[in-house]
Amino acid sequence: MNDTVAVRGLNLVKHRHPVKEKVLVVDEDASVRESLRRVLEDAGYQVALAGNSQEAVEQFDSRPVDLLLLDIGLPVKNGWDTFERITRAAPVLPIIITTRQSNQHDLAVAAGVGTLMEKPPDVTELLKTMQDLLAEPIEARLRRVCSDVVSTRPVPPQTPRIWHRH
């Protein structure tokens, strides 16, 4: 039997025996990483943090990850390099790309990214998006990653900075 728990105004499913999904948060800004860690742990996730591409790949290689939250504006090797390295090993891993950079939508859609969010992401929308991506059937992920047809869900007016691919 499942209950719900309210986290920052969002009702999330609370399992009787909590299954803690592992989220890897990759962002060059330590304060952003720490803020996201607190929010995600409050929502019941296990969180690993990385501040650059090398740390991200090391974290990914050392432990299973259920979802990747990746800033593409990383120093040295950018986030797209990290995305490519990780998706080579785990092509259907749910990934949320965050960015302050404009004109990344087309590249994100072409790469099969689950969601692209402009920084700073709205916490409620981030938690809902994570829940949706983690619940997405593997077949839907495969279609998104392998599809020649590119489509995006319409963006609700109150969240004009978020694009979901389906």
Image: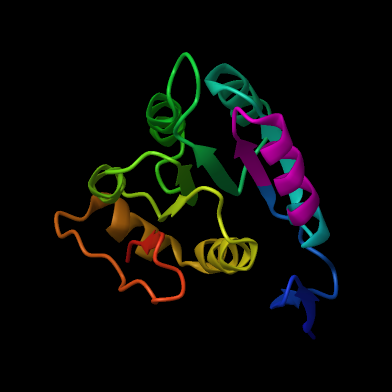
Q: Is residue 24 left or right of residue 147?
A: right
Expressed as whole percent of the image width and height from the top left, the position of residue 81 reads 39, 24
Image: 20 above or below 93: below
The one nearer the camera, 140 or 49, is 49
Quadrant of image for the N terminus = bottom right
x 56%, y 50%: residue? 120
Res. 85 image quadrant: top left
Q: Quadrant of residue 80?
A: top left
Question: 156 or 113: nearer the eye?
Answer: 156
Left or right placement of residue 87 versus residue 46 in this view: left
**Residues shaded magenta:** 23-39
Observer able to see residue 55: yes
Residue at the top extreme of this rendering:
76
Q: Nearer the viewer, residue 43 or 134?
A: 43
Relative horizontal placement of residue 19, taking residue 104 as reference (left or right): right
Q: Is residue 25 magenta?
A: yes
For the C terminus, the quadrant is bottom left
19 is within the stretch colored magenta: no
In the rendered structure, the answer to whether residue 99 lies left or right of residue 107 reads right
Instruction: Decide if residue 93 is in sight here.
Output: no
Q: Residue at x 76, y 39 (%)?
A: 34
Q: Position of residue 67 (x, y in %)?
A: 57, 49
Compared with 51, 13 (above or below) is below
Residue, x 31% and y 49% (percent of image)?
A: 112
Residue at image location 60% in from the left, 27% down from the top: 28
Classify 122 as above or below 106. below
Asked whether 17 or 58 is in front, the reply is 58
